[in-house]
Image: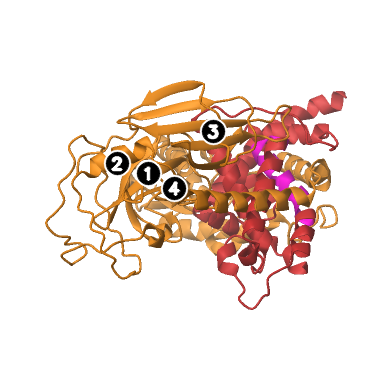
Chain colours: A orange, B red
Amino acid sequence: MTPEEFPDTGTGEEPRDALNRDVLDKDPDQRPSDESTTGSANEAEQTSDTTSDTEQTGDARQATEAQSVETEAQSAEAQTTGTQSAETQSAEEAQQRSEGDDSTISLQMDEDTLETGSQRLVLKVIHNRDEEDDPHLDELIRRAFAAYRATAYQNFPAPPVATILTSARRRSQRRWLTGGLSAAAAIVVLAGSIVLYQGSRPTDGTEAAREPSPSFSVSSSPTPSPSPPQPPASSPRMGVDEPPVIHLEEIDLHNTTITLPAMPDEPEGCDGGTYTFEDGRASPPGDYEWLIAVDPYPTLYDPFLPEVNTIVTTVGCGPDGFNEVDRLVVLYLEEGTLTTFDYVPVELNPTGEQLDDFQIADSELVIQFSSDPRSESPRTRTVRASWNGEWSITEQNPEIPAFDASSPPSRPEQTTSQTPEAPLPPS
Amino acid sequence: MTVALTGIPGMMAPVATLDEGMPMRSEAEFTSLYHARFSDLSAQLYAYVGDASEAQDIVQEAFTRAWQRWDQIGKYEDPVAWVRRVAWNLATSRHRRLGVIRRFLARSTPPENAPPPSPDHVVLITALRRLSANQRRAMVLHYLADMSVADIARECGVAEGTVKSWLHRGRAELGKYLAESEPVKEVK
């Protein structure tokens, strides 16, 4: 396993050696060598009046080997031969170790379990995994990976770099095109619904100075309701009598706070809540993080009607470092507050396909996917979404020309209707 | 360019490795980087996802995203770090879907114009697929990407002890599976 065999893969440091050294450097007490045996013996001597450095009880050894840990105090434990409770606890401890992540754990045994009966015996269980690895199996693994490293890369010749450059350029062009089209988008059914929802929201045409985007402390996301919320007499959040005119394009979605419903069809961890995004990511406690306005996909500002103040953008939620989009979310601006209207009930990361683009076309939200271009029959799939009290989703599967906003895809073949996936409490 | 081809183990925080003083690399450097690293990154991802086409897709996507942001990524001390991080993120995400939704399409078609995988590779990949995702990830990053326990822990956002646990159990499991396959090889 040399750098020549598999270039660019490291420092020349043997991984296993690195692991061993990592273990050794971390805590001298954890050293799996004779030093640890000596150390354990010393420790045992402090707690047991008769200690052997070499003897081990067979049962205790079985327990530790089964769970791949080794006790420093094995020799001391030997003095407790025949003490069933000690063996049981040792096994329990080993099991506990197998489920935990700590490098070291201690086990205090009841003094009644000791023959000596004079003191507590402290068993320090350490990770000594390498020492317990079967040398034969270890060698098998080394050989297998070495052989793989030496030749596997030959199975993956790089496609022409032009493929990469062209794909990236096409995405950028689509983004620009879609963004431009959004300004001239037609009236859509969704717009009407949102206008209704916003009800008597005052819409003065005051041309306020273009302030930097405020910090959008967003209210809980309401369910679209036939009874529109009444606007407050003033806008206490903004600290002025009349809310300033917020230009949607000035809202920095990557650095704002938004309340989002739970991500549909995602595992626990993508719960709804108010998330503060920084650079497009929000990392609440836990293993999951949220993304919004994910590159390279567009964010549609006011794609329906200028007065409606809607934003359609991408969101994703997944393990830390997640980098995909899951859904489109429709946000709207009301009283200086950016509020979630609903997720568009279309999965954006379906199996075997990738999201190409989305835009407003033919009075609907048109989402286009493509399959693996290397497959025998690469194709695109178009999904249309509109809102009229409930989501109407139509899907078209046949091949269609490349996404071209100037000639929107033909009418759908299948239609389904869905109510909002994430019913939201009224505000 | 040499910078991009070395220093793999220290690649886990690519955003933090932005070198303000480093000029942006050119398209030619991106191309060189791509050709130099595509294959081995794909091989690593293949060992994790178990699907050659999927692995290539993932790496290709990661390089595409890198090129889209090359004005920024190109300034990084080690742009490959960013590429690999994105690739692994994508792989992890797809694998999450495999585990949760069970809808992953199994494809076994080898990459075009590529030699078929050797029987030894198939044995290894098959054995790796029998490990848990975490164990497999740790094993691949450790044995194929030469990453230290600390780096893997940073990459996965877990404690080093957790990584050691994954590696230990992964070794035990993988060794067992490989040992099972040994008699077959001897018969041949």
Quadrant into which the C terminus of chain A falls: top left
| Dot 1 amino acid type | Val
Q: Mark 4 belongs to which subunit? A: A
Q: Mark 2 belongs to which subunit? A: A
Q: Going by the image, does A176 lie left or right of B84? A: left
| Dot 3 amino acid type | Pro
Sequence-wise first label, 1 or 4:
4
Residue B16 figure quarter: bottom right
Sequence-wise first label, 4 or 2:
2
Label 4: element kind: strand
In 3D space, how far apart are the residues under numbered discs 3 and 2 (Cα atoms)? 28 Å
In the rendering, which numbered label is found on residue A24? Answer: none
Residue sitting farthest toward the left: A233
Sequence-wise first label, 3 or 2:
2
- Residue carrying label 4: A313
| Dot 2 amino acid type | Ile
Count neighbours of disc 4 (C-alpha within 10 A) and say few if under 14, some if 14 to 19, many if 20 or more: many
In 3D space, how far apart are the residues under numbered discs 3 and 4 (Cα atoms)? 18 Å
Magenta stretch: residue B51 in it? yes
In the rendering, which numbered label is found on residue A194? Answer: 2
Residue A170 pos. (x, y %): 65, 49
In the rendering, which numbered label is found on residue A350? Answer: 3
* Of the pair B14 and A177, the residue shown nearer to us: A177
